[in-house]
Amino acid sequence: MFDVSFTELMIIGVVALVVIGPERLPRVARTLGHLVGRAQRYVSDVKSDIQREMELEQFQDLKGQMEEAAESVKSSMKQASDTLRDPLEEARKALGDASQSMDELVKATEEDIRNLPDDAPPPPSETSS
């Protein structure tokens, strides 16, 4: 904080010894030491509070960035699922239509077979010779 060398401290000590006197100097030095200690603790507390506030602000910024990234991933996943869902629904519908037409064809064929006269020749078989 202050740039005080050892020689300057010695000069201050000698002046204090002359001004205060040798009997009161230890008590004044002890009191001064307590005051300096309190000031250092106060400065340290203020520094740590400022550091905590800065870290909190950084964490809040990071939290905001993470929320934005999560929202972006969520929207891209929804978009991807929507683009996949549409062709699948179309394929499901086409398969349903094909199944329905096959059922109708089978029913029509069964109906045709039932309506054949008893003396009609049998249908050609697909056996290989």
Image (cartoon, helix red, strand yellow):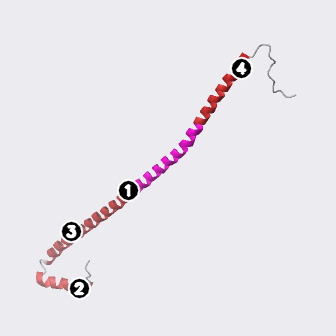
Query: In the rendering, which numbered label is found on residue 121?
Result: none
**Magenta-span inclusion, residue 98:** no
In the rendered image, residue 105, in percent from the top left (x then y), is placed at 67, 26
Mark 1 neighbour density, 10 Å: few (under 14) some (14–19) many (20 or more): few
Earlier residue among tags 2 and 4: 2
In the figure, residue 65 lies in which quadrant? bottom left
Disc 2 versus disc 4: distance between alpha carbons? Answer: 122 Å
Q: CA distance from mark 1 to mark 4?
A: 71 Å
- The range drawn in magenta is 63-92
The kind of secondary structure the magenta stretch mainly shows is helix
Instruction: Tell me the quarter of the image containing the C terminus.
Output: top right
As drawn, the label of residue 8 is 2
Q: Is residue 117 depicted above or below 107 in this figure?
A: above
Instruction: Give the percent coordinates (x, y) of residue 77.
Output: 49, 48
> How many C-alpha atoms fall within 10 Å of the one at disc 4: few (<14), some, or many (≥20)?
few
Q: Nearer the viewer, mark 1 or mark 4?
A: 4
Q: Nearer the viewer, mark 1 or mark 2?
A: 1
Q: Label 3, on which residue? A: 38
